């Protein structure tokens, strides 16, 4: 895909990592994806933007002292009006985890939990639109909601964000829909009710592109991360589910094959 030069409202526009080990994360992701880390110029902020070349590809924030929340990647959906969308989400059965907040001149954000229990961020762009590059090695290539309540999740995102999901499969063995403009799907909804381990809640999952998934998975281990699901092949490419040094999970996805749809387990 080319550099991302437009914000399509309702679709993923940013991802950031909340970590308890920012120095370790800089090294891990820098060596794995070739990312550089640029500190925010907002006064008092420890936020970091990861870049591939000159393009912004992800962010990183530091866990608050005493936080009991596991380190994790978060996905943000672009919206025209974060306040109105937050209220619409509340009315549609979502919970507001973090009320709308202005981030300097960059934009406004809030954090929700959808009715199936998956947290998701909202981003109203002002000076900062989000991803500068997608669909290539070292950049986001897919975003996926793994949900324990597929029907409720689909209805929520249709109502709040105007999604028009395209059904990829609708069987008890594999139930999956995709969203995005025609010919440019960017995210999926996976019925994970029969697949997630007991105790694992609904969640959004980030896919990051690499040229060689097996080599990248080996490098994850060398860098102190963990391979959670060994590389597997599908009609959509090669994938491996991994975590970084502190347990933040993401998926490696090949960019030498089609990556506009995922292959959920």
Image: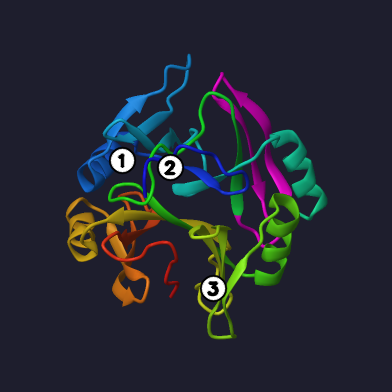
**Number of residues whose C-alpha sits closer than 10 Å to that of mark 2, classed few (under 14), some (14–19) or many (20 or more):** many
Name the side, left or right, on which 234 lies relative to 201. Answer: left
Residue to which mark 2 is pinned: 17
> Which residue is found at the position 55% from the left and 68% from the top?
199
Secondary structure found at label 3: loop
Residues at discs 3 and 2 in contact (Cβ within 8 Å): no
Image vertical order of residue 90 relative to residue 58, above or below: below
> Which residue is found at the position 28% from the left and 44% from the top?
29
The magenta stretch is: 95-118
Residues at discs 1 and 2 in contact (Cβ within 8 Å): yes
Q: Is residue 102 magenta?
A: yes
Q: Residue furthest front?
A: 182
Secondary structure found at label 2: strand
User: How far apart in space, not on screen, are marks 1 and 3 (Cα)?
Assistant: 28 Å
Residue to which mark 3 is pinned: 198
**Residue 25 tag number:** 1
Write down the quadrant of residue 133 in the picture: top left
Does residue 69 show up? no
Whichever of callouts 1 and 3 sits on the residue coming sooner in the sequence is 1
Q: Position of residue 86 (x, y in %)?
A: 73, 41
């Amino acid at each position: 895909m080319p550099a991302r030069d437009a914000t399509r409202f309702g679709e993923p526009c940013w991802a950031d990592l909340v970590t308890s080990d920012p120095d370790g994360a800089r090294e891990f992701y820098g060596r794995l994806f070739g990312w550089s880390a640029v500190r925010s110029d907002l006064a008092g902020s420890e936020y970091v933007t990861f870049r591939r070349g000159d393009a912004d590809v992800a962010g990183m924030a530091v866990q608050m002292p005493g936080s009991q929340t596991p380190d994790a990647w978060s996905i943000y959906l672009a919206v025209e009006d974060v306040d109105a969308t937050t209220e619409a989400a509340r009315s549609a059965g979502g919970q507001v985890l973090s009320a709308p907040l202005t981030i300097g001149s960059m934009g406004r954000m809030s954090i929700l939990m959808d009715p199936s229990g998956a947290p998701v961020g909202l981003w109203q762009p002002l000076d900062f639109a989000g991803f500068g590059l997608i669909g290539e090695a070292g950049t986001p290539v897919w975003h996926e909601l793994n949900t324990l309540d597929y029907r409720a999740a689909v209805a929520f995102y249709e109502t709040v964000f105007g999604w028009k999901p395209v059904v990829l499969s609708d069987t008890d063995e594999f139930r999956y829909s995709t969203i995005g403009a025609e010919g440019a799907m960017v995210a999926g909804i996976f019925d994970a009710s029969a697949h997630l381990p007991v105790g694992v809640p609904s969640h959004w999952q980030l896919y990051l592109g690499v040229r060689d998934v097996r080599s990248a998975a080996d490098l994850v281990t060398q860098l102190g991360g963990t391979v959670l699901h060994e590389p597997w092949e599908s009609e959509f490419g090669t994938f491996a589910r991994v975590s970084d040094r502190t347990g933040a999970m993401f998926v490696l996805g090949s960019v030498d094959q089609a990556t506009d749809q995922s292959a959920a387990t």
